[in-house]
Structure formats: structure tokens, C-alpha cells
Image (cartoon, coloured by chain):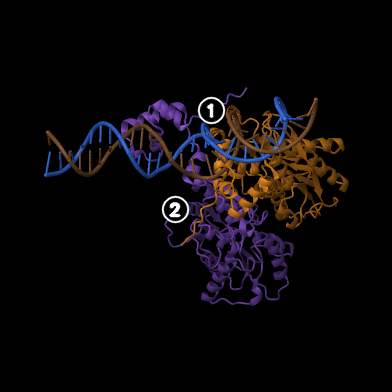
Chain colours: A orange, B purple, C brown, D blue
Amino acid sequence: MNKKPKPATIQDVARSAMVSTATVSRVLSNPGLVSEATRLAVQEAIHETGYRVNQAARNLRMQRAGAVLILVPNLGKPFYSGILAGISEGFAGSDYAVLIADTESNPLQDETLAGYFRDGRIDGAISLDGGISSAALQQCVRYGAGDRIVFLCEWVEGASFPVISSDNAEGARLAIRHLHDLGHKKIAHVTGPDGNVLTTARREGMVEERTRLGLPARPEWIIRGDFSLESGHEAARRILAMDDRPTAVFCAADMVAFGLISGLVAGGLKVPEDISVVGFDDIEMSGSYVPALTTIRQDRHQLGRRAAEVLLGQLANSSRNLPTKTAVSVELVTRASTAPPS
Amino acid sequence: MNKKPKPATIQDVARSAMVSTATVSRVLSNPGLVSEATRLAVQEAIHETGYRVNQAARNLRMQRAGAVLILVPNLGKPFYSGILAGISEGFAGSDYAVLIADTESNPLQDETLAGYFRDGRIDGAISLDGGISSAALQQCVRYGAGDRIVFLCEWVEGASFPVISSDNAEGARLAIRHLHDLGHKKIAHVTGPDGNVLTTARREGMVEERTRLGLPARPEWIIRGDFSLESGHEAARRILAMDDRPTAVFCAADMVAFGLISGLVAGGLKVPEDISVVGFDDIEMSGSYVPALTTIRQDRHQLGRRAAEVLLGQLANSSRNLPTKTAVSVELVTRASTAPPS
DNA sequence: TCAAAAACTGTAATCGATTACATAATCGGC
DNA sequence: GCCGATTATGTAATCGATTACAGTTTTTGA
């Protein structure tokens, strides 16, 4: 029943335009080489036959895969959605397919990523996961993929790949400054997981600004978390148990802030009346949470686009430029979870 | 500096094993046709040369794309993560690459999906989006892709494609039965968005079971929502304003339940003491929310795997079997957000 | 023991593009 | 008006696999 109208090939177009396949191919990829007249004739023929280039054939001939791989630590985290959208958009004009792999549900073996390159299944990769083993990266470099990997948001300390990320330290500073402006002096921080580069950047930005403003510091005001709701909740328990409670808390992620707030509220404190809370990320939920969360917005769409652009750039000029570090600016979004201390 | 050790081709293997390329190819894809002795020799040669099949070449020759596309309404919703993990796992053994597209951030034009098929960029698709226009689907059918599309979780009413989904009506019944068992009589429901097939299935299951149990019904106890946190919050406002308040609320999604709970708490009610809340989905956050949410668990991993299996089956036997509807069973998870009415 | 069938294996065409090289046509300068 | 340079186009090899068809060897059966 199905008409399967065999798709037109470059041969069909050539026949229809009465030129050679070489000419058709040139019209497609290097129109400057073809005279006005033939170009028009060929374009006409393309239109007429409904021709579409067969990527598999092109990729085979050009020895490329026509695909890039995005490594996401955990697709379930709402934080990544906007980023992926930005990435998709960035690749929309190109002829690269975008593959996505979740490194949590399907942990990356040391050889896996390199294997993708080795087998010619991908031309490049963007990693949102800073936890890739350096052995795995070594492998990729060995297969000549050293300049076709870009890190986004997270990165591997010491490895030499381009990195696109928000200005995490600046975000932390903005948060502290905001709380300071409101009149807070005793400010706590719930960190991300140990060993994470974002944890470090945000913690250091926080400490730096606190010092700069001459605010008091107590060791127990730096609470170890892991970006999760639960860790926020746990942090609330700690804070409730303190003698000398902070009047404001800066959380390393919005999810942490949600856990924290619900824990504090359950413990009888009011947010922001008794204690102010600032998050980091500005995920979708943050605006509609109760109370709406004051937070540091990362321009996730922008981050994604930039990463796509950088990778496309690398793929185009195989010239191996120096790896650069691009910082995307962040922004304080003031909402209902912060207020002057009582 | 990069050694680029040109990957071995099937020719290299053939040479090394002193057989023809045809034989090597047969060892790869149809070992039964080759004698024990040559097979071993070839395998040895494959090992020795480090040969890996070039998918681009194979795909070109076999006239396939070697890829499937997953259409996700909104990658940001935590609900989808487990499903995508399941899908990835389902395709892990196969030689299909998995492309993911977010239909919200990058709305699907009518021709887009069909275009992927037409251009031979994908062999099949799994749609988590029930909102695909039937014009778009018609197009796909026209390109002979009618039996290479599978719907997962959501579906298009009236279209004839295989559907894998949770038993939504049963989930709703379980929720109502649970509340009834606790002693609740006045049960409200916050629905999903109008026109969504899941909204309908869950609402009908709820109404059906409520009727079966002889529970009272009031029109205002069916509150229109849209699966979002905000709609839950809005529902709380409505409920707080009612004269004759329900003692329990069944929400069509966990996110709605979160919004509802925070709204109710903000309004001075306690959950579950004053009012019980049940969600639907059991996303990761639900277990660690405060209070931990009683909800209907969908086996998301299983859903994903099944969809992958069904699509792989269709791709293998191009025989166009009847579209089937697979219901994956759901489960009540009892946590802290429900209790007997006071 | 011999013909027919079965089991292996090789030759070469093919998938649909790109591009090096060759050839033909046109142009410009003196 | 002639020659080299430039421009436009075609021929055919190539990317790396699969597979129809043919040829060779082995097995089977009477």
C-alpha cells in the first residue's frame, strides 16, 4: 500500500539537469565553482526531483560521523533542560545529529567515550560531567579527539579542553553581597559535593566576599551538601540545632534551597522572616516555589549555545587553538525568600 | 603529534586472514555460513587488526540510518529521566544511535518528523509527546514510516501506533482506594491539562472508583490543573476557600502535589493531619519531600525499556503487525502525606 | 561409484555522495 | 591573433561495508 517513492539521488538530479553528478555536488557544497546558468538549472532540477542529500553517503565519503555526543550527569535534573535546549539550537543549523547519554544511569566506562571516537560514531563531544576519568580522556586524545571535546558547566581540573561555564565565583559573591545589603551578618553556606569543581568555585567566591565585607565566619556555617533536596533538608536539621544560628543561608543549588526551606519550616522557622535563603541556578520551579526563591540565575540557554558554537568551531578549523575558558555571566534574581533580618 | 592509526577496514582483515572481504563480512553478520576453521581465522585477524565495523558504510549499504529519535515534551521534567535511561538501556545492545529532541523548546513543525524519515536520518521514533499533529503523523505514514513509530506514556487518540503506557486508570483507582481505606470520604482531584490523554485516563479512573465506593462527588472537587507546581498551588487556594473542604486530594502528578502541599501549608493547614495528599509518578524528589509523598509509582525504567523493545521489534520484522497497547502496571507507594482524616 | 545437493568461498556490483585530475571553453594582454 | 591563465564541466576513483551470483569442494544417497 505504501508508495515508497524512492528518494531522488544526486544521479537523478544530474540526469534531470543534464549535467554530471560532480556539478550537482558542487552546486551543493561549493556553488562558487559553478556558472550562474548551470547553477540555476541544477537548483531547478533539485527542486523538481525533491532531492535531499543522503547524509550517510556524504558522511562515509567525507570520513565523518555527522554526530556529536552530549554527556549529561543526570538527565533528571531540571537544571539541564534549558542547557540541552540551547545545545540543540546551537546545532540546529549544522548537519550534526545530537546524541545524548546519561552518565549516571549508564556510567561511562573508561573506553566508552574513546570508543565512540575510535569507531567514528561521533565527531565531537560536549561533557556536562566533570567526573570523567583522565584515563578516559587520555584515550580520546590518543584517538586524535583531543581538540573535539568541550566541557560545559563542569570541567576536569588540569585537563586542557575548552570550558564554558557560568561565573560561579561571581554568582556566590552576588548572593553574599545581596544578603549583606539586606543587613545580614551571619551567613551560612550549604556546599555541593566534595571534589566537585562547582562546589569549590562557589564556596571560594562565598568565603572571599564574606571576608571582603568583614562578615563573621564560623566553621559550622559551612555545611557540606551534595546539590540534592535531601542534603538541604539535612542542613536544616543542623541549623535548627545550632546555638548561634545564621540569619541567612546561601545554598549551592536551588534544589538544596528547597530541601532547606521545607526543613526549616517544618522546624518552626519562617522563611524569610526568621531566616533568608538564596539558591543557585534558577531552575524553572524556583519562581513558583513558595516562597519564590531568590537565586543566582545561570543563563542555561546561553551556556548551551556557546558550547555548541565552540565545538562547531573546533570541528570546522581542526587547527588546534589553545583551550579557552569562557565565563557566561550570572545574575541575581531577587524574590520572596530573602528579607532583612528581624 | 597525534598518531592517527588509521582504523582497520574489512579489507585489512581479509588480507590478514587471507580470505575475501565477503567472508569477513559473513563472519560478522552471518557466522553460520562460514566454516569453523575460517571463522576462527577471521576472528583472530579481527582481533589482531583491532578492526571495528564502520557503521556509516554499513548503514549506507543497508539503506538504513542507524538511529532512532526520541521526542520528549520537556526534557526538564524530572519524570522523563528514568524513562530515557530505560530507553537508552533498551537500545544499548543494538547498533542504533539514540537522538533526543525536546518538543517544547524546539516545537516540532509538521514536516520536521517526517523529514527525518524522508531524509533517512532515522529508522524509527519513540514519542513521549501525545500532542503531535495528525498531519505530521500522516506525513510519516506517507514516507512509509507508519510502522516505525511507537508512543510511550502519552498517545494520539485515534492514531494507529503501538502504545506503551502505565495503567493510568488503575493508578487512579489505587489512589482513591487507599484514601478510602484510610477513612476518607470527601476526595478532590487536581487534573492535568485539558485534552491530554493522561488527564482523561486518570480523571476517569478516579471518578469510576469514587462511584464504585459510593463516595460523594461535588463538581468543585474536580479542579483543573496542568501537571505544574503552580497549578497545585492555585488548587490549594481554591480548596482553602471552600466551605465544604475535601479531606483528601488526589493529584494527577507529583509536581502538582508539591505545589498543593506548599499552598495548603502556607494557608495554615497541615498535611497529612488536616488534609491528605496523593500524587502520581513517584519522581525522585517525592521520597525526600517533606512530608514524603504518598504516590502512584510508574516504573519509568520499565516503560522506557519496553518502548525500546517494541520499536526494535518493529524495525526487525518490517511485517506490520497490529498496533498493540501495552499497559505497564503501577504501584501505590505509601508515605507520610496521607493519614486517616481527623 | 557417480550425480545431485549442500556447504563454502570468491568476484565484483552496489549504496550515494565527494573530489583529484583531465579536458574544453573563454578571457585578457600584447 | 596567439598563448597562457582562468573558468567551467565531466570522468572516474573512492569511502567501507553487503550480497547476488558463480565457482569450487564436500557430502549424500542409491
Discs 1 and 2 share one subunit: yes
> In the rendering, at what x and y percent does residue B189 appear?
62, 69
Task: Tell me the residue that label 1 is attached to.
Answer: B6
Task: Tell me the residue that label 2 is attached to.
Answer: B313
- Badge 2, how many Cα within 10 Å: few under 14, some, many 20+? few
Q: In the rendered image of this protein, does residue A147 appear above or below residue A288?
A: above
Residue A207 found in image quarter: top right
Q: In the rendered image of this protein, does residue B70 appear above or below residue B326?
A: above
Using residue A183 as the reference point, say whether residue B267 is left or right of it: left
In the rendered image, which quarter contains the N terminus of chain B? Answer: top right
> In the rendering, at what x and y percent does residue A191 appear?
71, 40
Task: Return the residue nearer the eye: B26 or A200.
Answer: B26
> In the rendering, at what x and y percent does residue B276 appear?
62, 65
- Badge 1, how many Cα within 10 Å: few under 14, some, many 20+? few
Looking at the image, the residue that sits furthest to the top is B1
In front: label 1 or label 2: 1
Task: Return the residue nearer the eye: A342 or B298.
Answer: B298
C-alpha span from label 1 to label 2:
35 Å
* Secondary element type, mark 1: loop
Task: Return the residue nearer the eye: A85 or B199.
Answer: A85
